[in-house]
Image (cartoon, coloured by chain):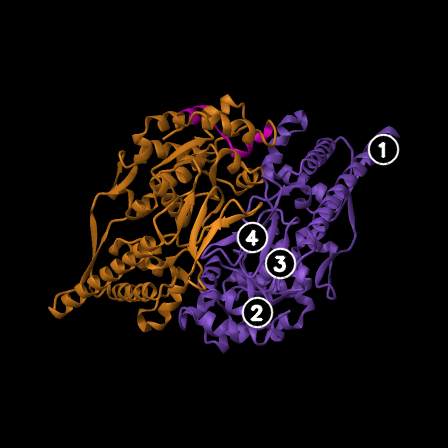
Chain colours: A purple, B orange
Amino acid sequence: MAKRTRTKQTAKAKRQRESDQALARMVEVAEGIHGDIKREKKPHMSFPIRSLSNVRYDPRGGTFKMLGRKSRRDFSYATVKTFAQSVRMLAVSKAVVEDDDIINKREAYYRSKSWGEAAFTEQPESDTVMEDPEAMLGFNREQIGFIPDEHGGSVAGRLTVIDQDPATGDDVEIDCTRFGTGAYSVPPQVEQLRFETTAKFILVVETTAMFQRLVKHAFWDTANCVLIAMGGVPTRACRRFIRRLSDAFRLRVFAFTDGDPYGYANIYRTLKVGSGNAAHLNEFFCVPRSRFLGVTPQDVIDYKLPTQPLKDIDIKRAKDALKNDPFFRHHKEWQKAIAQMLKMKVRVEQQAFAAHSLNFVIEEYLPRKLRHTKQFLP
Amino acid sequence: MAKRTRTKQTAKAKRQRESDQALARMVEVAEGIHGDIKREKKPHMSFPIRSLSNVRYDPRGGTFKMLGRKSRRDFSYATVKTFAQSVRMLAVSKAVVEDDDIINKREAYYRSKSWGEAAFTEQPESDTVMEDPEAMLGFNREQIGFIPDEHGGSVAGRLTVIDQDPATGDDVEIDCTRFGTGAYSVPPQVEQLRFETTAKFILVVETTAMFQRLVKHAFWDTANCVLIAMGGVPTRACRRFIRRLSDAFRLRVFAFTDGDPYGYANIYRTLKVGSGNAAHLNEFFCVPRSRFLGVTPQDVIDYKLPTQPLKDIDIKRAKDALKNDPFFRHHKEWQKAIAQMLKMKVRVEQQAFAAHSLNFVIEEYLPRKLRHTKQFLP
């Protein structure tokens, strides 16, 4: 019997409540500025500092936590334009939330062309200002209607996604076992989605090609799981989708990437605890139930895999992770694995199993690994 | 009443026939080599030359056609390794087709690790050799099981795709009106797909963000069309999908990209007539029913759009298209449009309509343009 996440009413109510909260926060911020002006005080805005320096690793929750340091933008001769833009951007956000619409960075940039002298002249300018409401309000961009121009990941397997039909507003049930060799493409906003599943775990893979192999051989059917292709470092929509699905059913998430510093420190670390320069968002985007399946340096030995020599950038990235990344500094198992890789001086790709036979990965590697999930790296 | 492409039996039979033909060609090539050796002649292979120099534009079919020049690889001291690899790769292709399996470039590279001295040492080496069977056999890579590691495009709208369930082999019907805010992700192999549709045309858009806007506002419902996001230059799977769908129902394909030389000469040109360095494949991948909806340089004036100055690379690309590209050289309308852009010295993005209002593109631009499809650029 399929389990189902909360009832339709509750999910819609939750979404409405979030919109209302976001709108209330926007009005509150605007009233603060307005109040300052009326009292003839210089208005200001304050933001949490968004960098690894304002972050600590919380081993219990398995996430980065903000340390609470804030920066402040005062109204002055030098900041007048940025200040005006931030207020304008807040107004755009408000309209988008009220209309239940979406907006992306380029559209926001072009919306500014009607702001007279406050118009953005370059996109990096609008990007920064767009991240302001997000940080200031404590909502993630997607919750206030800002969507990225990127693909949210592909999904196949034992999962039904419940979304609303944009034309009618009715529920639609999307059965991810019924896509043939294709897949469900995750939308940029995932807050409204509900789920039904009987899967035992979620398997997230780095490459689209590996995902295709697993789909072609219906691995989700034999392993009773949900398959997700990240296509490199997972996008925000992809991470939030995995997080919400994992939370809803307390599903474990197993990550299968190349065995190199990019796979460990960029893809997996971002999936599990979030990224350093968006530390204020990690509470939404991290996936604490993630465990690392492979490819590990030990797998190279155990499965006699062909390798490539580490490049200079790999070595730099690995040393940097050991030295500066609070996540890897916390986990002894990871330090050991990365040290082993540095000693072996090689990296390995998830396609390397093809050296034995095309489907060795499906017939041997994954089943063997999945019998000992407790041994996965944290 | 939905129209349906050929019956199940015919589609499966067609696919089987293609596999049989590919296998027969492989055996024929191998027997040719074997025969040469038995007769103590030096074996050789021959390939069509894959470049713009071996191509002419066929204005009737709307595609690039090969001129038929061939290159020949003789067996010699210098070519012995490549020769051996090509034969090995042919054997791998044969196994993949026989097993109805798939393989990607990295997997092919690793398969070679069991070939002893013929093993590839670098990926570019295997890439070239992998393109050999394709050219030599006259089948596209996907028909002989080679799949790319890339996303095949997202689809939403009035379309049902019929694929087979990898687990059971049964037909699955994928209703692309039932994905909510998500989408159908096109698989890497599309030859087996069948279609049902009542749509009047296919609208292909450059950016995922624009696709999301059109999906969010159910544009496919009001316009009665199929929406496809290319995400930049369309991948092979994406182009082949559009081509097969367009062919099946004689559906027109309207392209909506940024108004810049990259949108015209890279994205649209590739979609419509194919790419120069894969000229031997264009018969499979071109989409002759394509017309260019916008954004045109004239749209910048008609719709008072904000622009950016052309960069040096834009100017170079535009001049190159006018001078060297057989497609643009053939079409006076395109020469006029590109000359107009060079004169205006600006480029325009498909998000620029947001300057008027977020949904101007849906409420004004697209409906107005779609009333005069005959005026679309060829």
Q: Residue furthest right?
A: A39
1 or 4: tag closer to the N-terminus: 1
Which mark is on residue A174? Answer: 4
Q: Chain of mark 3?
A: A
2 or 1: tag closer to the N-terminus: 1
**Up/down of A377 relative to B169, above or below:** below
**Up/down of B13 relative to A345, above or below:** above
Between the residue at mark 1 and the residue at mark 3, the CA separation in whole angstroms equals 49 Å
Residue annotated with mark 2 = A293
Q: Residue A362, percent across and down?
A: 47, 70
Residue flagged by tag 1: what amino acid is it? Answer: Asp
Q: Chain of mark 2?
A: A
The answer to if A219 sits in the magenta stretch is no
Q: Nearer the viewer, residue B298 or A254?
A: A254
Between the residue at mark 2 and the residue at mark 4, the CA separation in whole angstroms equals 28 Å
Mark 4 Cα shell of 10 Å, populated few (<14), some (14-19), many (≥20): many
Q: Nearer the viewer, residue A63 or B369?
A: B369
